[in-house]
Amino acid sequence: MQIGEAFISSGPNAAHVNTVLGKRGGPAGHAWATALATPTPGHQRFAVIVRPGVPVQPPTLFVNKATFVNDNHGLLHWGPAQAGIATGVTRAVRESIIEDPSDLTLICAVWVNPAADDPDAIYRNNAEASYVALGRGASGEPTATEINQALPPSNPFFTAPE
């Protein structure tokens, strides 16, 4: 199983994507099917498509991290964020980061800020974030040394004191 993460850009149109890539018959495949079958209010998991009737390969489950706050916020998930994920995953397959998608499943947990307002930026940032996260998962990044060099923990919402 490969686990990846990427945070691309800043502000309300930034993308934060976590990926879990693994065998269809293994824990990742089980998690994929279970998550699809158990939606919760405000979190409508769905299979990522290139266009209607053309699902991404490997089958990719879009899991929204932010509860849909209104119709527009939901459309930003279903539209540009999903298209970005489809682009990033397809690029990862085309460039052999994902070598053989035929027996794999992919879960993408995707953050779309409720204040997001630029569909094109959301698309670009999610395409890059999904691609980068998959690359990091494939290469086992970050290393223990990289983690230790990054301390203290910091993110766009908080920086831990040293």
Image (spheres, rainbow, N blue to C red):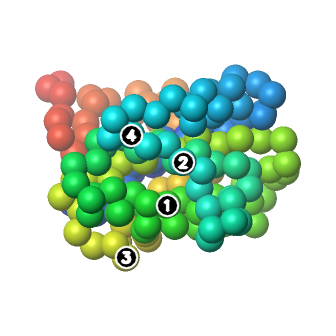
Residue type at mark 1?
Gln
In the picture, residue 48 is in which quadrant? bottom right
Q: Which residue is mark 1?
A: 82
- What is the distance, in whole Å, between disc 3 and disc 2 at their CAs? 21 Å
Residue under circle 3?
Answer: 120
> Mark 1 or mark 4: which comes first in sequence?
4
Q: Position of residue 145 (x, y in %)?
A: 49, 30
Q: Amino acid at mark 4?
A: His
Give the Cα distance between marks 1 and 4.
14 Å
In primary-sequence order, the first of circles 2 and 1 is 2
What residue is pinned by disc 2?
46
Mark 3 vs mark 2, foreground winner is 2
Q: Residue visible at 63% across and 68% down? A: 52
Q: At 37% across and 76% down in the image, what residue appears?
A: 120
Left or right side of 54 for 83: left
Per the image, the residue denoted by label 4 is: 43
From the viewer's perspective, is residue 34 above or below residue 18? above
Quadrant housing residue 26: top right
Q: Tag 1's secondary structure? A: helix
